[in-house]
Image (tube, rainbow, N blue to C red):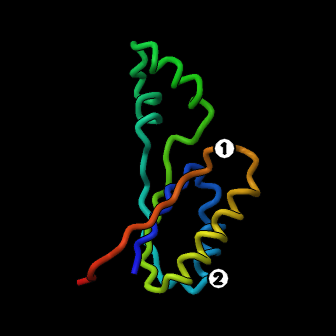
Amino acid sequence: MQVLFIILNNPDYLEDVLSLLSDHDVGGATILESQGMGSTIVNNRISDLPLFGSLKSLLKDGHVYNKTIFTVIRDEEKLNNVVQALKQLQKKDEKAGLGMMFSLPIAEIY
């Protein structure tokens, strides 16, 4: 049993991700609005240091907020199928940085 986390940098893909999860019989997920550290630095105008100035130029055209999706997947094969389908979705977008995902084992659910 694993929890799959998907940090979606481009919220325009939210519907595609949710459809994909549904197509793979993932019964539910929680969606949170989130913001990465780089976006926070850029959008709060913390640019006095040279590092932050260069970071600002890289991130200025990006989305301010991310969508963080997490779901529990009990079956290892289903998890692998979902991850592969999400990787294929990412390959459709030529831009890097669409997001990231990772999974963690769950000992028990209460």
Residue at 42% over, 22% down: 45
Residue at 32% over, 76% down: 106
In this rendering, is residue 69 above or below 65? below
For label 2, count other residues whose C-alpha is less than 10 Å away and answer few (under 14), some (14-19) or many (20+).
few
Q: How many marks?
A: 2
Query: What residue type is disc 1 on?
Result: Ala
Q: Position of residue 15 (x, y in %)?
A: 63, 67
- Mark 1 — residue? 96
Q: Nearer the viewer, mark 1 or mark 2?
A: 1
Q: Position of residue 55 (x, y in %)?
A: 51, 25
In this rendering, is residue 92 above or below 109? above
Residue at 64% over, 70% down: 84
For label 1, count other residues whose C-alpha is less than 10 Å away and answer few (under 14), some (14-19) or many (20+).
few
Q: Are marks 1 and 2 in contact (CB under 8 Å)?
A: no
Query: What residue type is disc 2 on?
Result: Asp
Q: SS at mark 2?
A: helix
The quarter holding residue 72 reads bottom left
Q: Is residue 64 left or right of residue 87?
A: left
Quadrant where the image shows the N terminus: bottom left
User: Which disc, if any, is residue 80?
Assistant: none
Q: Position of residue 59 (x, y in %)?
A: 56, 31
Residue at 42% over, 51% down: 34
Q: Nearer the viewer, residue 99 or 41?
A: 99
Q: Nearer the viewer, residue 62 or 3?
A: 3
- Mark 2 — residue? 23
State how far apart marks 1 and 2 are (Cα).
Answer: 25 Å
Q: Position of residue 19 (x, y in %)?
A: 64, 75
In this rendering, is residue 6 above or below 29? above
Q: SS at mark 1?
A: loop
Quadrant where the image shows the C terminus: bottom left
